[in-house]
Image: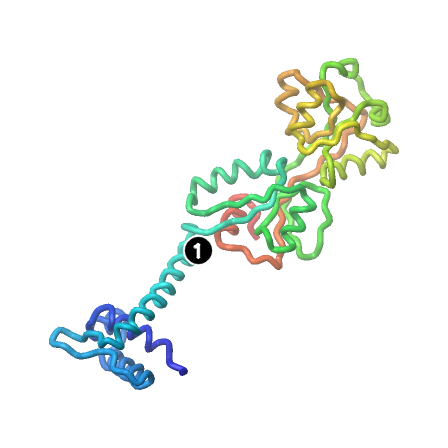
Amino acid sequence: MNINLEYYKIFYYVGKFKNITLAAGELSLSQPAVSQAVKNLEKSLGSTLFIRTSKGVRLTDEGEVLYSFVKRGYESILLGEKKLQEMQGFGKGEIRIGASDMTLQFYLLSYLERFHEAYPGIRVKVTNAPTPETLHNLQDGQIDFGVVSTPFEKNAHLTVWPVKEIEDIFVAGSNFSYLKGMELEYKELEKLPIMCLEGDTSTRRYVEQYLREENVYLHPEFELATSEMLVQFAERNLGVASVVKDFAEEKIEEHKIFQLQFKKKIPERQFCVVTDQRVPLSSAAEQLLRILNCSK
């Protein structure tokens, strides 16, 4: 049965108002057009749906049955439209972000606080993962955008916004104070108990690549899951830790650890916001990117 869905919309409003004139006004149609649509629906269904009364119309038994289903369906459509408008107006919705501990703590968190204050109805889901996994999640469409640290492999589908400079350093505790004030060669690190992040992270890859270019090869005694743990281990004199400076600054200022000085600095790298052109963005995600100054 192929019935014009516009007939059901008109049927809904006539059934709602029990009055053809009021329904016509709501629909911005003429009364004859509404009456004809009802007749066409009745003819297609082979049933009388309304009985005229002195005050307007009332539903027949068949009309009541049909109206109970049409009402449910049409009002679901209206609710869906409302939810979509709320999402477009940032009243509701969800943003999916990929970020590491480092990019979340030292870049993204303050922006998320501002965004949540402005748009409390938007749910923000952060998938915590290192850069390689974040990029994989982005390309699979599991997140809207990622905040990652260089280096990483860029492909033609990625749009990249550098947003913050970061510096890789080595820190140690009081047992290594004999190194304070010395200008070291990186080769000295091969003689020291080194601690670094475990696994495949952009931080570890970057530092190791730079040291290889200096003909320095490290064999870490501790490989830890987080930079916070590296700083804690350094404070307890368990070794010399390779960390991003942001993680260590507080302890350095408190003189609980110190930064080793080298004749050459490891070149700074960057935090970057990345999107994939193949992943469509919601209005809420685009608004957050604008707050991050990363809109197109």
The residue sitting at the left extreme is 54
Query: Which residue is painted at 64% across and 50% down in the image?
Result: 137
Picture layout, residue 138 above or below residue 186:
below
Residue 65 located left or right of residue 82:
left
Image mark count = 1
Q: Which residue is mark 1?
A: 88
- Characterize the local packing of mark 1: few (<14), some (14-19) or many (20 or more) Cα atoms within 10 angstroms: some
Q: Tell me the quarter of the image containing the N terminus.
A: bottom left
Q: Nearer the viewer, residue 104 or 39?
A: 39
Question: What kind of element bears circle 1?
Answer: helix
Picture layout, residue 295 above or below residue 117:
below
Query: Which residue is painted at 83% across and 27% down in the image?
Result: 186
Picture layout, residue 49 above or below residue 280:
below
* Picture quadrant of residue 208: top right
Query: Which residue is painted at 40% across and 57% down in the image?
Result: 83
Residue 52: image location, x then y, percent: 17, 79
Residue 229: image location, x then y, percent: 66, 27
Query: Which residue is painted at 39% across and 61% down in the image?
Result: 81
Residue 142: image location, x then y, percent: 59, 53
Label 1 sits on what residue type? Gln
* Picture quadrant of residue 202: top right
Residue 207: image location, x then y, percent: 77, 35
